[in-house]
Image (cartoon, rainbow, N blue to C red):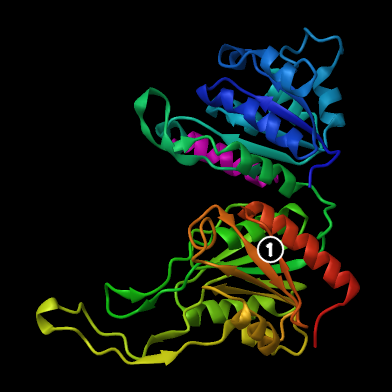
Amino acid sequence: MLAGRRVVLGVTGGVAAYKAAYLARRLIERGAVVRTVMTQAATEFLGPHTLAAITGERPVIGLFDADDVSPHTSLGRWADAVVIAPATAATIARIATGLSDDSVSATVLATSAPVVIAPAMHTEMWEHPATVANVERLEAFGYHIVGPQAGALAGGDIGVGRLSEPERIADAVAGVLPGGPLTGAHVVVTAGGTREPIDAVRYLGNRSSGKMGNAIAAAAARRGAAVTLVTAGAGLEHPRVTVVHVETADEMAEATWAAAEGADVAVMAAAVADFRPAETLDGKLRRREGPPVIDLEATPDVLGGVAAMADRPFLVGFAAEVGGLDEAVAKARRKGVDLLVANDVAAPGSGFGTDTNQVTIVLPDGATEPWSLMSKSEVAERLWDRIAELRKREGPAT
């Protein structure tokens, strides 16, 4: 969480500098107090007045043009965190070698606060051995590197080197700061839909994208938790999130049960297949051979396995339903969870692949709490608020 945290945003001279304005806004929306510092080259891409209008303070640009006789040391001492976005190859090289001949590199060298670096440059520059070595050196300093991403670059190029999106960078800043309400907690989250192979090409699966689980993991990390995300989907990047990629229900069960040992909270948001082919066929099924007969067998009960642990974490289950809630209420009682999140995946704007969700909270006694349609990020934040209330009031179910 960034409420009341002091963040110095350093902007350097690249085309992606315009995104620094959006990043400043995202940080402020999360409650941070933001001050900015720019290289002279950065002002060729982004007007200082834009950052001044957003943050309420004029950026520091030169080392000698501010009212403060030592603006870089003042900023470095003031900051709870420093983020450089975009960080050009030249700036990364300066910081890695200890040069401090501009206001941004000097501020980084003058701070003891956590530092987040968000690189942006052409692919060839990012992959050059000098840049690779410099980034490794920054990581050895303990700095957190965010991105870059693959995508469209300046000049019409496409490749790795695109600045990460402001929301992702803001997550990284929150992630390097201690003191959230889940600080010290270990959280396990499962996400995505498992795939059970039929042959070398085909599989049984479902439409789960993993977006809800990712949002839950990111929200927990923003609150200070150390998160293990076991996912059959794309995963996410966050300094407090360890991602374990799996494909099948067997792999999901093994990874989840191992991670849940000693965890404080487990949120089972993955859509795990209930059945799988009893045998995986070698090679590829051919149309000319006609429709195959596929025998199915049950997969491991991942949620049930966590519920059965002797010293299990506070346990949250998910139920993707179509229509009423009777099955979800029965599942909450049968599985012995502390809380169950049910959603109608057939409802508009809800369920698999969407950016929004409309869920109903089901408590162990069968009581239900319907929530309105909202973004999955909002669902995640509200879910963690509800989990905190229940953990404080009731403790884990037995």
Can you give x and y, in whole percent of width and height, for residue 249 in the image?
48, 80
Tell me the kind of residue under disc 1.
Answer: Val
Q: Pick out the residue farthest to the left.
A: 288
Taking the view exactly as shown, the residue that stands out farthest to the right is 393
In percent of width and height, residue 155 lies at 38, 23
Residue 358 appears in view: yes
Magenta stretch: residue 178 in it? no
Expressed as whole percent of the image width and height from the top left, the position of residue 286 reads 15, 78
The residue drawn where x is 68% and y is 40% is 170
Residue 44: image quadrant is top right
| Above/below status of 188 relative to 91 | below
Q: Which residues are magenta?
A: 128-143
One can see residue 240 in this view: no
Q: Would residue 218 be found to the left or right of residue 121 on screen?
A: right
Q: Residues within 10 Å of mark 1 (few under 14, many from 20)?
A: many
Report the residue marked by disc 1. 227
